[in-house]
Image (spheres, grey):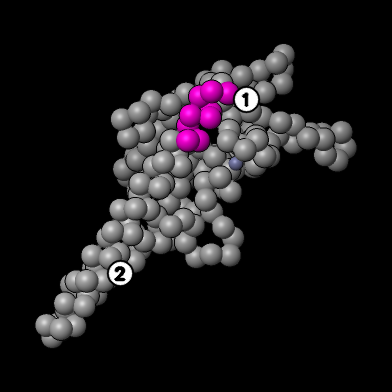
Amino acid sequence: MGGMGSGRRSSSCGSRENDFHTIEIKWLMQQGCFSLAYFPMRWSRGEIEISSIGVTVQRDGDIVTGLELSYNCRGQSYKYVASVDWLPCYFGNSRPYFLCPHCGRRALKLYGGNLFLCRRCQGFTYDSQYYDPWMRNFVNVKKLQEKMHKKWMRGRTWGKLIEKHDRYMMALHAATKATLKRYKSIEDRIKKSS
Ligand SMILES: [Zn+2]
């Protein structure tokens, strides 16, 4: 089964969430993935495939108990299990949920950065426009750079912008380090527990 997930996930709408690759458990089940032993997932923007992972389905008898995700990301290889939990719903059916590999909370969707985690662990907040300090800083720098490219301005104003740019760049640098550190500690915990 090739090309699972391709096309559908190519995102043109600009929501922040779409910057992440998601795995939706309901969709996987509807696609029949739970009856497979293994399947690939791919994400693309337009024609370009931007990432792919391998998913091995773990079972206890007939019941899917977890999905083992394996992939390479930024030169590092990953292999860990996103457990699947079944909760009873109406008429005796039950509905699957992921258990977030980091916090163990139930989630219908996992969001991939370096790791596939629940919304909360990936750093989304519902009420804030930007979901983490890194992104906020990144956006600050980008906006400022655009402004500096577009506008003709007098030396003094320009100098102020340069100063501001330096400040923003330093903040971005710090945020990048903090984000990498955060991922690292989550990775370590996941490695220990699996
Ligand atoms: Zn989580």
- Which quadrant holds residue 144? bottom left
Q: Which residues are magenta?
A: 185-193
Q: Is residue 134 left or right of residue 145?
A: right
Residue, far right: 91
Q: Earlier in the sequence, mark 2 or mark 1?
A: 1
Name the magenta segment's main secondary structure: helix
The residue shown at (71%, 21%) is 63
**Mark 1 CB in 8 Å range of ligand 1?**
no
Q: What amino acid is found at the position of numbered circle 1 in the picture? A: Gly
Q: Quadrant of the C terminus?
A: top right
Give the residue at mark 2: 143
- Which quadrant holds residue 84? top right
Q: What amino acid is found at the position of numbered circle 2 in the picture? A: Lys
Residue 146 place in picture, x, y as percent = 24, 70
Q: Is residue 165 left or right of residue 62?
A: left
Task: Please check the rendered image and state whether residue 186 is part of the magenta-colored stretch, yes or no.
Answer: yes
Image height of 98 relative to 65, above or below:
below
Residue 118 place in picture, x, y as percent = 58, 43
Circle 2 residues within 10 Å: few <14, some 14–19, many ≥20:
few
Q: Tell me which image quadrant ligand 1 sits in.
A: top right
The residue shown at (88%, 37%) is 91
Q: Nearer the viewer, mark 2 or mark 1?
A: 2
Secondary structure at numbered mark 1: strand
Residue, far bottom: 154
Task: Please check the rendered image and state whether residue 91 is part of the magenta-colored stretch, yes or no.
Answer: no
Between 179 and 73, the one nearer to me in the picture? 179
Give the residue at mark 1: 66
The residue shown at (27%, 60%) is 169
**C-alpha gap between disc 2 and disc 1:** 42 Å
